[in-house]
Image (spheres, grey):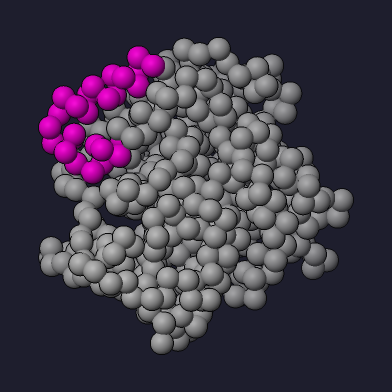
Amino acid sequence: MSAPVIVVGAGIAGLVVALSAAPRPVLLICRSESDGATPLAQGGIAAALAPGDSGNAHIEDSLIAGAGCNELAALRLLAFQAPSAVAWLASHGVDFDRDATGHLRFAREGGHRCARVLHADGDATGRAIARALAAAARQAGHVQRLSGPEVGALLRRGGRIAGVEARDARGRTQRIEAGAVVLATGGIGALLARHTSPRGADGGGLALGLAAGAAARDLEFLQFHPTALAHTGPDGRLPLITEALRGAGARLLDAQGRPLMQGIDPRGDLAPRDVVARAVWRATLGGAPVWLDARRLGDELPRRFPTVFALCQAQGIDPRLEPIPVQAAAHYHMGGLRTDLFGRCSLPGLYAAGEVACSGVHGANRLASNALLEAVVFGRRLGRCLAQGECADAPAGRLRVIGRGADLSDPQPLRQLLWRGFGPERSGTGLRAGLDGIAADPALAQSWQGRLAMNLLQAALARPQSLGAHWRCDAAPDHRRAA
Ligand code: SIN
């Protein structure tokens, strides 16, 4: 039997890799059964399946959103394999929403020229996908699940990543060897003071890969979502108010009730996410509110957007009768561990999938609803590659443990520091102040979170131009996308 594969993370990317690696044995390690961004995803899966749409149109829209710096080979795979990704999900039990005539129902989101986004259970798409794939993984004889431990180190043998060191809640560590290790650990949103991510999206997998010497790419490209509900939870998380609401007719209003996007971008409320997020961010800088007015949806709102409706109700807001207060919040990391088109990192034996990976497919700003799609398209490619025996030989040599370093006991100061320096608008002065702030605090500077933050700030400092979601207010704007 070939050597097992360890997949760290059981969101959509980890589950797709694990299922696609059959019959190779897979050990799926996750911190908790429910953690991860997938169940929170309200947007759906973009796929050019509607009459009149095409893979080329999907590519063009992704390039416009990504400020033209997307990796074209990866983007072609993403757009042209989207229909088969949708079919694969359906074959694993995902029931995409249909209209009264039984045809797939397409929604529109920012940056898409037409309605192209498929949902399941309305705005609970991520939950529907996570449920279906987790059930499939439970049925799959080749997948074993280990829930609870935190992976804090990679094992290396003979120049190759050869396993992980996992620590349980009592601090006991366990070394688990493997033929290949796949990081599917999600993004970095929870490192910032305002974000839409689960607590586990703290960059831990990215930090592991960097500590082992894997190459990174585009670390400065962090996307901010324009419409997080203006109610910050204790760990900085704000509930997401899906962009599909604007696709269905909701409009952003400023404090005086005027259309926010008027005069900012001809695409209005459905401009790419970076443009709208900056407009919201600027309008709220002095403490003024910004509203998302979805009243025109009336009773359609609870039916089509049950998650948004429940989130608003939990804050005492009835979005059928009153506008929703919104803010910009960190949402998705386009950058990450550099991967090729099969999810291979620069270190033999190490792979990455989903948000922690960066093939360059999203460029400087991801097009809405391309994230779940990326996890399926590239997760399947990686899984199949592992199924064919990649890195099956047990490497020889002494086993080395490469830890990412000490944990930060209180992440709040770092979250504030990154929000100030690495937020929706950046400057050389702000980025350097962030670096100095970390260097001046020994606990911060020695923690893996502090070191990761330094990597992010340095990457942003190294790109003095504005590009996509990376907006430098001290640089001449990129006139192709100035907003
Ligand atoms: C949303 O529903 O607005 C977010 C979807 C995405 O991140 O693509």
Is residue 277 located in the magenta-colored stretch of the structure?
Answer: no
Please say if 306 is above or below 32: above
Q: Residue at x 29, y 24 (%)?
A: 434
Q: Is residue 221 left or right of residue 406?
A: right
Residue extent of the magenta highlight: 428-453
> Is 376 left, or right, of 8 in this rendering?
right
- Mark count: 0
Q: Residue 195: percent from the left, percent from the top?
A: 40, 39
Q: Is residue 327 above or below residue 406?
A: above
Estimate the x, y position of residue 199 in percent, counting from the top left: 33, 50
Q: Which quadrant would the C terminus be assigned to in this image?
A: top right
Query: Is 445 included in the stretch rendered in magenta?
Result: yes
Q: Is residue 303 visible?
A: no
User: Is there any visible trace of residue 83 in the rendered image?
Assistant: yes
Residue 281, placed above or below residue 292: above
Q: Residue furthest right?
A: 52
Between residue 301 and residue 98, name the one nearer to us: 98
Q: Nearer the viewer, residue 469 or 93?
A: 469
Location of the N terminus (image quadrant): bottom left
**Residue 138 image offset from top left, x and y in percent:** 44, 80
What residue is drawn where x is 15% and y is 29%? Answer: 441
Q: Nearer the viewer, residue 448 or 169?
A: 448
Q: Nearer the viewer, residue 17 or 369?
A: 17
Report the side of 180 relative to 229 (left or right). left
Q: In the rendered image, which quarter is residue 93 located in?
A: bottom right
Task: Determine the residue positioned at 43% across, 21% down.
Answer: 426
- Residue at image position (30%, 32%) is 454
Majority secondary structure of the magenta segment?
Answer: helix
x and y percentages locating residue 360 in the rendered image:
56, 44
